[in-house]
């Protein structure tokens, strides 16, 4: 458990420093450690909530959250995240989908899409159409979906870079809450009790790592180093899952 908590701490620090929750990596670390796959999404989503709550609040207090657009995307995604949490899925399909989402996550970080600003592109108006699938995926496998949403918003010049970061943070937080609720309804009390017992030290680890990441890491290391380290970690665990 000590090595797992340390790995969660490191993942939370890296992901928080680039504005994300890290749910897919938490899931993969749990899977590689042999934890029952049915417990994984609930634990990962709870860790997501701990990591991104502080960032969401800071963005809101700073007046950076574009509430109208962010709430539209989140309101569309949240019910889908709940349905994803309720959906039964077999272990092999779950691990395959999780591994694929990790590899895609790493690619979005490696591409490091330029934060282009200016007038929104024509495709920006269609962004609500991607919210529901991302929400469903979030609830199904225990991720927030923001790491896929943010690059699309940058590509379409949906808003400023800071507004997009604030939107992704809110998107991850709300999707994680709704997905977790669906997972708990699907699993029942016994599975919830097992998840809580296992999750407590991990939640402490990500709470500390997330705070350090959001407050200090981006100032101590160049942002491109942090992105590369985060992508390397994500790609490694994703490949481990896909290759067995």
Image: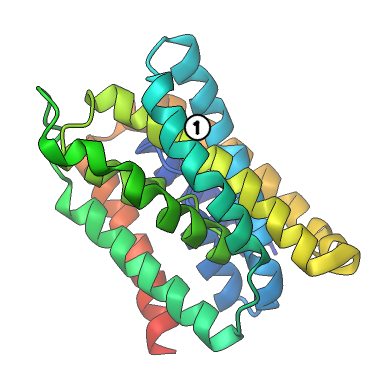
Up the image or down, 129 lies above or below 158; here it is: below
Q: Position of residue 24 (x, y in %)?
A: 48, 61
Q: Is residue 197 left or right of residue 222?
A: right
Which of the 4 quarters of the picture holds residue 54? Answer: top right
Q: How is the image coloured?
A: rainbow
- Front residue of 55 and 5: 55
- Front residue of 227 and 221: 227
The total number of labels drawn is: 1
Where does the N terminus fall, quadrant-wise? bottom right
Residue where numbered disc 1 is placed:
212
- Front residue of 210 and 104: 104
Where does the C terminus fall, quadrant-wise? bottom left
- Front residue of 5 and 124: 124
Badge 1: how crowded within 10 Å, few (<14), some, or many (20+)? some
Q: Is residue 209 visible?
A: no
Q: Where is residue 3 in the image (x, y as percent from the top left)?
A: 61, 63
Residue in the picture at 47% in, 51% down: 22
Q: Position of residue 159 (x, y in %)?
A: 23, 25
Q: Can residue 181 be seen in this view?
A: yes
Q: In this view, does 56 lie to the left or right of 232?
A: right
Q: Where is residue 190 in the image (x, y as percent from the top left)?
A: 90, 68
Which of the 4 quarters of the picture holds residue 232? Answer: bottom left
Residue in the picture at 22% in, 35% down: 222
Up the image or down, 169 lies above or below 84; here it is: above
Residue in the picture at 49% in, 50% down: 144
- As helix, strand or loop, the secondary structure at mark 1 comes to helix
Q: Is residue 45 left or right of residue 189?
A: left
Residue in the picture at 64% in, 44% down: 177
């Amino acid at each position: 458990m000590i090595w797992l908590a340390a790995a969660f701490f490191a993942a939370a620090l890296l992901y928080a420093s680039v504005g994300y929750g890290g749910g897919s990596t938490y899931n993969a670390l749990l899977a590689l450690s042999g934890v029952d796959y049915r417990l994984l999404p609930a634990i990962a989503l709870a860790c997501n909530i701990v990591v991104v709550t502080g960032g969401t609040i800071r963005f809101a207090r700073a007046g950076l959250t574009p509430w109208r657009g962010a709430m539209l995307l989140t309101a569309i995604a949240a019910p889908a995240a709940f349905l994803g949490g309720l959906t039964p899925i077999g272990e092999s399909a779950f691990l395959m989908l999780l591994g694929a989402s990790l590899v895609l996550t790493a690619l979005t970080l490696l591409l490091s899409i330029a934060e282009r600003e200016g007038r929104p592109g024509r495709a920006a108006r269609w962004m609500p159409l991607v919210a529901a699938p991302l929400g469903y995926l979030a609830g199904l496998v225990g991720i927030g979906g923001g790491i896929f949403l943010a690059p699309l918003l940058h590509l379409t010049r949906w808003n400023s870079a800071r507004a997009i970061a604030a939107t992704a943070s809110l998107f991850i937080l709300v999707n994680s809450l709704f997905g977790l609720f669906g997972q708990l309804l699907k699993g029942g009390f016994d599975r919830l009790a097992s998840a809580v017992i296992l999750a407590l030290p991990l939640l402490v680890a990500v709470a500390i790592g997330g705070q350090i990441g959001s407050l200090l890491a981006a100032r101590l290391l160049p942002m491109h180093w942090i992105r590369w380290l985060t992508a390397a970690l994500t790609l490694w665990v994703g490949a481990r899952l896909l290759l067995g």
